[in-house]
Amino acid sequence: MVHAFILVQTEVGRSALVAAALRDVRGVESAEAVLGPYDVVVRVAAENDSTLAVVVGVIQKTDAITRTLTCQIADTPA
């Protein structure tokens, strides 16, 4: 299982709507509107890197998203 945070920039005034829409995407564990240089932070879980790429692609095609930055979580010792 791989996990990632996806930082999302949206069109002005659309962050809450985008966060709500992203919560319905398969693989999205959470999506929260935030303050700062990014508008939404999304946590994703996927079976592998290929599946993660598919989820990211779905997120990038969501209306009102202008830019994303994917930060895959590095494995840490248990």
Image: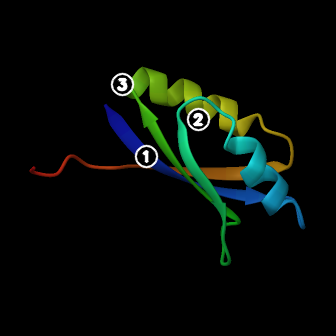
Q: Which amino acid lies under the numbered mark 3 shown in the image of this protein?
A: Asn
Q: Is residue 32 above or below residue 20?
A: below
Q: Which label was assigned to residue 48?
A: 3
Q: Are marks 3 and 1 in contact (CB under 8 Å)?
A: no
- Give the label on residue 56, or none: 2
- Circle nearer the N terminus (2, 3): 3
Count of numbered tags: 3
At a point 64% along the width and 30% down the height, the residue shown is: 57
User: Which secondary structure lies at badge 2?
Assistant: helix
Does residue 66 appear anywhere in the picture? no
Indicate the position of residue 60 as horizontal and vertical percent values: 70, 38
Mark 1, Cα crowd under 10 Å, few <14 / some 14-19 / many 20+, is some
Question: Residue 4, labelled with which disc?
Answer: 1
First along the sequence among labels 3 and 1:
1
- Report, in whole angstroms, how far the alpha carbon at label 2 lies from the one at label 3: 12 Å
Secondary element under disc 3, as helix, strand or loop, is loop
Residue reaching furthest to the left: 77
